[in-house]
Amino acid sequence: MQKITILIHCKDQKGIIAAVTDFIVRVEGNITYIDQHVDFEQNVFFMRLECELTNPNSNLTAIKNVFEQTIATDFNMAWEIHPKEQKLKMALFVSKYDHCLFDILGRYSAGEFNVEIPLIISNHWDLRSVANRFDIPFYCVPFTKDNKEEGEKQHLELLKKYAIDFIVLARYMQIITPKLISIYEHKIINIHHSFLPAFPGAKPYHSAFNRGVKIIGATSHYVTEELDEGPIIEQDITRVSHINSVEDFIMKGRDLERIVLARAIKLHAERKTMVFDNKTVVFS
Amino acid sequence: MQKITILIHCKDQKGIIAAVTDFIVRVEGNITYIDQHVDFEQNVFFMRLECELTNPNSNLTAIKNVFEQTIATDFNMAWEIHPKEQKLKMALFVSKYDHCLFDILGRYSAGEFNVEIPLIISNHWDLRSVANRFDIPFYCVPFTKDNKEEGEKQHLELLKKYAIDFIVLARYMQIITPKLISIYEHKIINIHHSFLPAFPGAKPYHSAFNRGVKIIGATSHYVTEELDEGPIIEQDITRVSHINSVEDFIMKGRDLERIVLARAIKLHAERKTMVFDNKTVVFS
Amino acid sequence: MQKITILIHCKDQKGIIAAVTDFIVRVEGNITYIDQHVDFEQNVFFMRLECELTNPNSNLTAIKNVFEQTIATDFNMAWEIHPKEQKLKMALFVSKYDHCLFDILGRYSAGEFNVEIPLIISNHWDLRSVANRFDIPFYCVPFTKDNKEEGEKQHLELLKKYAIDFIVLARYMQIITPKLISIYEHKIINIHHSFLPAFPGAKPYHSAFNRGVKIIGATSHYVTEELDEGPIIEQDITRVSHINSVEDFIMKGRDLERIVLARAIKLHAERKTMVFDNKTVVFS
Amino acid sequence: MQKITILIHCKDQKGIIAAVTDFIVRVEGNITYIDQHVDFEQNVFFMRLECELTNPNSNLTAIKNVFEQTIATDFNMAWEIHPKEQKLKMALFVSKYDHCLFDILGRYSAGEFNVEIPLIISNHWDLRSVANRFDIPFYCVPFTKDNKEEGEKQHLELLKKYAIDFIVLARYMQIITPKLISIYEHKIINIHHSFLPAFPGAKPYHSAFNRGVKIIGATSHYVTEELDEGPIIEQDITRVSHINSVEDFIMKGRDLERIVLARAIKLHAERKTMVFDNKTVVFS
């Protein structure tokens, strides 16, 4: 039985839920998951559904066409309908830190992520051996102040070649170029090693240590042009105390980074996030 | 504008959501909150809605009648419709521990609970002065092995006299009688000082200490005839270590008990819990 | 048997622990708690001990004198020795929010804090009735831009009259004057409703909501002249999501504020905090 | 400069700390970490120290001898002194679940564990490819009701051959034999997928789901003959709700198992745990 995922947002209006659920009934769909959210400040309605199409002759293209011409037009919706089993293609960008990379590839190998990882891109050669252990093509694309343009060109070629759907920066220590950001809008996930908006930018563990905080955190977010200011997908924290050195902060933080990034990847891969006005709606 | 809360559960079937949301539109309701849950194991559908009735002439009794005769009958629903502003009447049962009592009355005075507390019942006189501080009638109903029948009789009279909707056992150290439980089915909330099902029964902090656990917890649940086995509403935990004595466990546990009980009261008062098959659905 | 608490800090040197524990043996003390910390960055040694003086004829003044003339001089220590049972006198400053006040007075009445609360000071009359419920003298000291000097004068007189040891700002919505801060250096505890250093200043819940964070927090800290930049004593957080309004943030935050402030009061009252270089050492 | 770790426990007596710290001074040691704990119920004193031996001619064997003949004898101590840099040899036992294995090997490769992993033992061939990815010898030792004796014999031979110091059961689904437990007393670490003592034995996630708990947990502990009743090293939990299926419990639990087991390995490898009376002292 074909399963589909539907994502919708539009101006909040009376009758949307009734209209959508009614539509599903008409196309012989069986709703297995439905959640919705109204942002009353912005007056925006969000919805996520999963359905089984019980009629084996259902034609997804036809369904999409009817949806577009009826409901989507009536309510002026932004919408997406995807076959649920379709795996997104994910590119990994790394530099020299290997802990997030090992964690992602371990989870990938253990079948936890509903994605394909066709390649790993780095600005250094250091992690090639890790990529090799997991039999994933590894590309070293140098990326410095002086060769940003050439680097970006290579990135775009590789992403196109492998038909990449979204990008994960697993402690990739370079600023992403505006062009790449605009092509992959809300499709580049970064992990920042602080509970944003505290300690943006470089060396957050050192700043946290110097401030004497009692908790440290990590934040996964979509990359926008404003550094560390994109829509937050997930955050988590752990306790620290006066007995912890900055090296302890870094070590404890590694666990946070791993888990907060893994959760974000999972949410994005399962199409459970929607972005609006620099915030995320995260369906559970 | 009148606001109402609707709670529904029934066998899971196609078209329920469409039918319900359609009904709301017909009675000129504006849905401000909707959440639903399907228990696929039991094949049961749960739903909670909040609506504003935009027509000032709306008649709640009439709406209920139509609902009963149409949708509720069609889908064979168990359902409730309540005016949202109606405050539930809550009785507090206490013994000698005062920390939950102080917390509940402080929150009540600060306006955090949408309830009325017309009386406090205890099997001891010790906490009368606390009740007096907050100007709430205090009844001492002795309750021992030998006078359970007389005690239960007094309880029932007081609960009737004050038209009590639900009961909160704020560290009340007596077993509730089966008769009272059956009258107030899923309307008696207890706080147990462990993360159930670990350490049911007496002295859980001592048992936790002896076992050498690294986390302790508290559990709020609806009271059923099986001791500490009723549907769980909320749980939370805190970390302990080898440096903590059993007295430390008790002190740290007080904060857990307070907060886990307060959350359960809030959820029940706002009609955000539903019970099915000894489990709760807790709408957020 | 008399119990004492000893707090020490000095330049880290060889032999400190041996010298101190040896001293305790010599004065017939039985160590019941000992903890120490070395700040390797600053090269500072911190120590906290609790002892029972097993000789009923022990003279605390004499012990202090010997300590000062021997060890304290040898190692150039900053030190304090206090009788453990001595309760600190704590002044509460409040404005209009009552949730922290109710929580503190409830805990105080339930015997959780080893302090005396001789008075409550506010810049408004609103919370007088709460003070009355708990039979604590309440003083309204107006405090606006125009009468800061007069307000400060009254504060100082009241604090002197009641021999106040430390001050707790339980959501007191005014800036403390530099003079008061310098007199009560590291003896004024504030609760800020964010996980500092994120969202300092006014309206942190609104800022957190607008940023779309997935966790909110609260921070208790000693007040210094730099707003919200004093040494952090304790922090905690709770999860939020897109379904939460800013009002939900505020409501969830109340629980954080209560508990994070209560923990800081308890730590300070039990002399478990030491401040150095704008950070705290918090002994457990 | 040679670094050593000292672990001590003995009957609590006056003067232990003074004697030990004095000893360190005498052997030209510089204490870089010291922590102690007194179990007042059992009247037992525990201590852990890390020191640098500042004299390049220090002889560890000689130091141990003097320690044994003086302090250890005076106070009747159980004690250990280890060179800090010495890596423990750790054997991994697995069955078919790969998530803990991937996590441990990823952390091992990333340099997070101060151990050597000379071999992996399994009762199935399934995970050989994972071992191969990380270039670690993999042995399949069948282990069923009928061949326990033969299995145990092979285990003991392999553990001896590789000079294994401690064993980690990374979701190894077989009961360890009493003989192996007694040889590796408090040196076999298991991960159980519940917050013990709740849900011991098989299928804890299913039991947790059926009970309707709001939190699930994981527990790492030393293996003793009583199933799931050994000394607890570490526990952690995560929240679940009515929307989670038992498959969700299992998926969320994987993260708990990974992290709780990794923490236990790290603590054991750094000699930060001591066992007494079926409980652990865990130094931070």
Image (spheres, coloured by chain):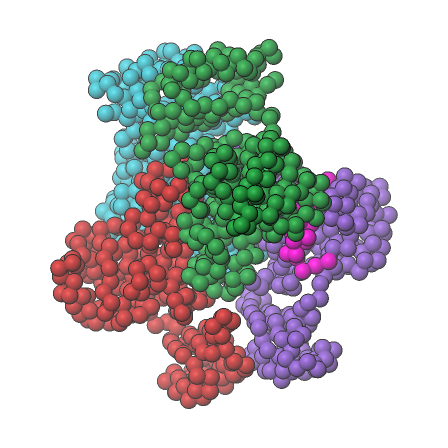
Chain colours: A cyan, B green, C purple, D red
Residue C106 included in the magenta stretch of the image: yes
Q: Which percent across, then down, holds residue D80?
A: 39, 77
For residue B136, above or below residue D261: above
Relative side of D64 to D41, left or right = left
For residue B85, above or below residue B183: above
Relative side of C102 to A191, left or right = right
For residue D49, above or below residue A29: below
Question: Would you identify the image quadrant in which residue D152 lies?
Answer: bottom left
Q: In front here: A27 or C87?
A: C87
Relative side of D28 to A156, left or right = right
Q: Which percent across, then down, holds residue A38?
A: 50, 25
Q: In front here: C269 or D116?
A: C269
Evaluate whether residue D234 shows in this view: yes
Q: In front here: D38 or B187?
A: B187
In the picture, the quarter occupied by the N terminus of chain B is top right
Q: Residue at x 13, y 65 (%)?
A: D150
Q: Which percent across, then down, holds residue D280?
A: 41, 66
Q: From which residue to which does the magenta span run?
A: C95-116
Question: Would you identify the image quadrant in which residue B212 lies?
Answer: bottom left
Question: Would you identify the image quadrant in which residue C10 lies?
Answer: bottom right
Q: Residue at x 60, y 52 (%)?
A: B97
Q: Which percent across, then down, holds residue A44?
A: 50, 22
Q: Residue at x 57, y 71 (%)?
A: C33
Residue C93 included in the magenta stretch of the image: no
For residue C195, above or below residue B207: above
